[in-house]
Amino acid sequence: MAKIALAGNPNVGKTVIFNELTGSRQHVGNWPGVTVEKKSGKYAHRGIEIEVVDLPGTYSLSPYSIDEKVARDYIVEEKPDAVVNIVDASNIERNLYLTVQLLETGANVVVALNMMDEAESKGMKIDIERLSDILKAPVVPMVAVKGKGIGELKDAIYEEITGHKEHRHMTIGYGKEVERAIVSLEEDIERCPSLGKYRRRWVAIKLLEGDKEVLKKVKDAGCEYILKKADYIKKELGKKLNDDLETYFADKRYEFVDDVLGVVLVKGKRVWTFSDMLDKVLTHKIFGIPIFLAMMWAAFQFTFAVAVPFMDAIDLFFGWFGDVARASITDPALRSLVAEGIIGGLGSVLIFLPNIFLLFFALSLMEDSGYLSRAAFVMDKAMYRIGLQGKSFVPMLLGFGCNVPAIMATRTIEDRKDRLITILVNPLMSCSARLPVYILFAGAFFVGIEGSVIFSMYLMGILLAIIMAVLLRKFLFRGKPSPLIMEMPPYRMPTLKSSAIHMWEKGSMFLKKAGTIIFAGVVIIWFLSTYPGGPGSNIETSYVAMIGQWIQPIFAPLGWDWKAAIALVFGFVAKEIVVGAYGTFYGISNVNEENATLRGELHNTFTPLSAYAYMAFVLIYVPCLATIATIKSETGSWKWTLFAVGYMVALAYIVALVITAVGHLLGFA
């Protein structure tokens, strides 16, 4: 089986091309040794099965971030049969820097020149054949979102992996003195057998650049004499050139890119585009933030309204399934476990699956359209003022889906103080696991305004994150955050296929959790709520009641009973279990806001005020064990992990208490 890798800058259409190539034959996991998402898939062409690996989006192959390291390591260590470099034709000046670095590694590169329609709309004309001649690599013009060029790309990949064992790509000239040094080092590298898998010229250049990863490879190969020679040459060249060599090499690559574009690119007159007109409104310094908030509110309204028929179908299925289990199983203990424990617990969580999938679908549409990059730009100035740097916006936004990958995404933040602040406030972003709790309580107590009430939870999380960021910056991490530098991709019409795939990738994580952590949780809750009395016994005499009544006094000022208290304890494992707990407590398989039995039980325990305070508590306190483990992994410190747990629990209690107290004063008891 042949292997190819997809490499490119962020926002160049890499995911669209990956989806077009692999279709449904995809797998998502993690790269070995790191918690960075790895996407791979397969397709067949002309009788050859080809595995496609989607590398993290990166602007260069200098391993300053974990994404850059993952991408470069795969290319130089795994040596795929071809590397497909996706280039944004409308922004070819910046994109070609990565192309040059890929060619220098010696990889068999196929350049997918994507978004040709956008380049043409800007009046740009690119000589494809001339570009291919200069790079000595195939160049395929494409408009991936419309499916144009996919067949030609498959043909080019096939030719590359069957017709070329090793390319003799173009070579950048770095000047006589530097070239002499490169050749000298190449001779020594050739005599070091352990370095034989790497292109000698690439290793020599990286040694002169002072690349720490390559320096380590040479040292591990037992060829320290090369390091000594490279260090001496580097110092001598630095004196002669009066420049830092890493900067010198980067400048020469940019000079090469400029020279290439001078030959192959003709720029037309600047045209005022539809993207420009939209940006005038959507990134407006006054209207930008209200528009962003309105877009998010619309997403939540859409999530709640469209999900209803799907929720009803799941409701009917689990209700029927529970009745079948009760009628079919004769053993009382097993019947109780299956009907009340497994079906009741899992059914009470899975009924909210449509809401979660639809939320991810809405966010995917905004991401694929190019709007989320504008949202980051709009929010940057406000975030800078509160002590969060611009790069923090993307992890914060990812937190609406799941706090675990969101905290991992902080690796792109270079400054440790900025990164720690982002990690510590990220759990306040309301992840999809809290959504079932919101839907349950909002549907039961706030009929007709459910979407607005749920939206208020997300706003509350954002507001609290802002307050905590200000406090952390002022008292624990003094100094100013670094500014945001990012590129605005053009607006694009999102494709249903791409957005659906994104929705499935993220939503399936919820399904996997339901089949593992949540399943185990509801079974434990069933046992604790059934025994020691056994099936049919009064839950008030169960183990779970004993534990709940022991901790209930802590929550008495908030007006919650022991069931509410113990559900929060179980929610420490995973927030969905809060809802699963209620399904198990009452033996209800269809836990939703329209269930009359559950509504009666909730109304016996909560008022609209105490229900809202409960939702706020669920929003703020410890997200889940997986998030805590990720905080420990990413900070490398138990001190910051325990600090995060402590402040979130304390903040949750304080906010819920304030909501309750103020509500009583205003007469909402």
Image: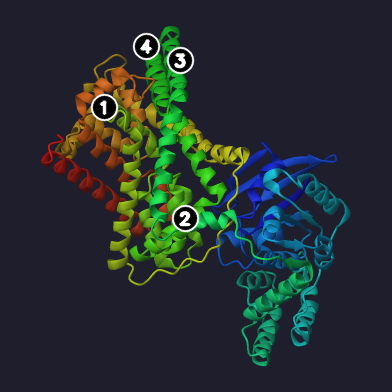
Q: In the image, residue 524 lies at what x, y percent?
A: 36, 29
Visible residue check, residue 574: no
Circle 4 SS class? helix
Label located before the other in sequence (4 or 2):
2
568 shown above or below 203:
above
Q: How many marks?
A: 4
Name the residue tied to disc 4. 332
Q: Dividing the image into 4 quarters, which one contains the C terminus? A: top left
Name the amino acid, label 3.
Phe
Q: Is residue 27 left or right of residue 477?
A: right
The residue identified by callout 3 is 321
Q: Which residue is mark 2?
A: 281
In the picture provided, is 372 more to the left or to the right than 558? right
Tell me where residue 91 appears, x and y as whole percent: 65, 62
Say which amino acid is labelled 4: Pro
Determine whether label 4 and label 1 are within 8 Å by CB.
Answer: no
